Image: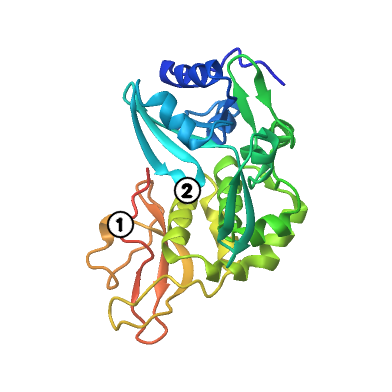
């Protein structure tokens, strides 16, 4: 464990952890906030994992702040305090994924390591406490130092559980500038077809985040893995089954009408865009016309 001497936590976060500890429950920061702290990146969300059952979390915090059972079935309670929304989730175990996207059952546990072991990547499987420091059972800190994207456990098993992890791994590869673990890279190529089990909305969300990343040009490689990615109905003829045909640099100001005039440019004010082509009528459109790079 490493001490968090430079982890500047909001008072609301510290109060939640302290109150859970006072009631004899464990409470740790988990996931992206720990990863981003180690990467010296701005932290947008603070997620807390705890040994307390959801009913206990609600009972403890109902007198002091607004409590919303946002995902009570999966152990998540949202606390509204000091102008922040903080999710508190009970340690859990996920079992027997269905259709490569959702677990068939979720059970609660009081073991932090069991909870961390279900996560996708080592860099996302760390926990932190203001007094106890960082708990890192799978080598996430070392992988950050080495610049490696690696799964917790067998990459084939992790990708088959939830196929969206194929894109998530690729997104971190692009956004962080890290390298993919060799075994993971091989598995992504082998399992790319599993993306067919994932909804268009979830795929679109990950693609948009990849497009915002510093290494967005590497989306070409990802597109090679899934040549027939379905993105919805053709807005011109209604055909279902558009194909992603390429990654282009497009000046959005030049898009006079969608699908009629697209002028490629190398200007600084241009954005990358995935274009789709309908195999039936030839209509060309932006993959997500509402996409805005933030």
75 is higher (above) or lower (below) than 246: above
Question: Number of numbered discs present?
Answer: 2
**Residue at 60% from the left image edge and 25% from the top image edge:** 26
Q: Is residue 63 left or right of residue 109?
A: left
For disc 2, the marked residue is 73
What label sits on residue 290 in the rendered view?
1
**Residue at 55% from the left image edge and 31% from the top image edge:** 52
Marks 1 and 2 in Cβ contact (< 8 Å): no
Say which element carries label 2.
helix
User: In the rendering, at what x and y percent does residue 189 appear?
Assistant: 68, 65
72 is higher (above) or lower (below) than 161: above
Disc 1 versus disc 2: nearer the observer: 2
Residue sitting farthest toward the left? 256
Q: In this view, does 243 lie to the left or right of 127?
A: left
Looking at the picture, tell me which residue is in the foreground, 246 or 78.
Answer: 78
**Residue at 33% from the left image edge and 50% from the top image edge:** 292
Q: Quadrant of residue 157?
A: bottom right
User: In the rendering, at what x and y percent does residue 259 appear?
Assistant: 29, 72
């Amino acid at each position: 464990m490493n001490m968090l001497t430079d982890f500047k936590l909001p008072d609301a976060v510290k109060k939640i952890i302290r109150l859970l500890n006072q009631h004899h429950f464990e409470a740790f920061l988990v996931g992206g906030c720990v990863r981003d702290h180690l990467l010296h990146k701005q932290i947008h969300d603070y997620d807390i994992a705890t040994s307390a059952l959801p009913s206990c979390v609600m009972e403890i915090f109902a007198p002091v702040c607004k409590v919303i059972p946002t995902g009570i079935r999966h152990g998540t309670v949202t606390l509204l305090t000091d102008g922040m929304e903080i999710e508190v989730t009970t340690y859990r175990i996920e079992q027997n994924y269905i259709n490569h996207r959702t677990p068939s059952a979720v059970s609660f546990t009081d073991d932090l390591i069991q909870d961390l072991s279900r996560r996708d990547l080592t860099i996302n499987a760390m926990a932190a406490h203001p007094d106890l420091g960082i708990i890192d059972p799978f080598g996430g800190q070392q992988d950050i130092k080495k610049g490696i994207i690696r799964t917790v456990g067998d990459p084939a098993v992790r990708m088959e559980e939830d196929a969206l992890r194929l894109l998530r791994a690729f997104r971190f590869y692009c956004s962080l500038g890290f390298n993919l673990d060799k075994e993971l890279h091989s598995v992504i190529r082998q399992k790319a077809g599993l993306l067919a089990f994932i909804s268009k909305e979830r795929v679109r969300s990950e693609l948009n985040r990849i497009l915002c990343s510093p290494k967005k040009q590497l989306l070409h490689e990802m597109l090679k893995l899934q040549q027939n990615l379905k993105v919805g109905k053709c807005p011109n003829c209604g055909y279902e089954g558009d194909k992603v045909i390429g990654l282009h640099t497009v000046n959005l100001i030049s898009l006079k009408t969608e699908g009629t005039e697209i002028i490629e440019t190398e200007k600084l004010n241009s954005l990358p865009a995935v274009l789709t082509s309908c195999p039936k009528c030839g209509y060309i459109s932006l993959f997500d016309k509402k996409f805005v790079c933030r």
